[in-house]
Image (cartoon, helix red, strand yellow):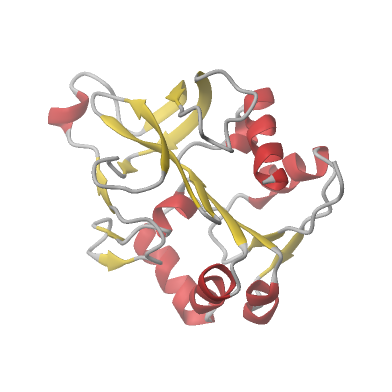
Amino acid sequence: MSNPKITVVDYGMGNLWSVISALRHLGCSPLTSSDPDEIARADTLLLPGVGSFRKAMIALQQTGIDQAITEAVQVNGRKILGICLGMQLMGLGSSEDGDTIGLGFINSTVTKFTFEEIGNNKLPHIGFDSVHSHSASHLFKNLRKTTDFYFVHSYRMLPSGIHGTLATCHYGIEFLAAYERDNVFATQFHPEKSQANGLMLLKNFLEV
């Protein structure tokens, strides 16, 4: 694989080291940036994230990174991968810590798992779990249709009404585990913490 140019967005709420290490393992030399101008001009973006949706959106808005990401993706047509909170930020909005508008790349709202849905399961949803993908998926190329990936989250999107190529996971209820449409890609799970399966998924993203 050639050395693709990828910019990891640093807005102060991501565990960047794991992502950067995985990308380097695949032969990349990722750039980490909090500069809106650099982000807007990026060839490929990776949006990680851990923590509160509301705090993350405030951080993106205060720095102008939200507008830079939108320019890169929707104006310049650049490819983006959102991971965990990064995927959720790409939705319409979230109820976490108060209703907050998201970037709007995925036509779904982020809400918390309810105890009626998950039954005896625990929150947060932590650990390896089975993801069921579609044969048309680019992200899951050369992976089995049902493959394990590592999750850690309490909020989720539901797959109903979303247009795109979807992958799902079941945790009391079926939820959106991965999304791809045109130049927008996202995973609720952490590929950088999912061993060989995660490295393959990241490789597939880089090669799309």
Indicate whether 61 appears above or below 166. Answer: below
Q: Nearer the viewer, residue 206 or 59?
A: 206
Instruction: Give left or right: position of 14 versus 1.
Output: left
Indicate whether 145 appears above or below 5. Answer: above
Hey, which residue is sitting farthest front in the picture?
Answer: 136
**Residue drawn 35% across and 64% down?**
54
Q: Position of residue 12 (x, y in %)?
A: 57, 64
Residue 155: image quadrant is: top left
Q: Nearer the viewer, residue 182 or 194?
A: 182
**Residue drawn 65% across and 52% down?**
16
Instruction: Give left or right: position of 185 versus 28.
Output: left
Q: Nearer the viewer, residue 153 or 79?
A: 79
Q: How many marks?
A: 0
Instruction: Give left or right: position of 75 versus 4.
Output: left
Q: Position of residue 132 (x, y in %)?
A: 43, 24
Q: Position of residue 15 (x, y in %)?
A: 60, 49
Indicate whether 18 appears above or below 56. Answer: above
Locate the N terminus by quadrant: top right
Q: Position of residue 168 (x, y in %)?
A: 38, 31
**Residue drawn 25% across and 48% down?**
111
Indicate whether 92 appears above or below 115. Answer: below
Hey, which residue is sitting farthest left in the picture?
Answer: 116
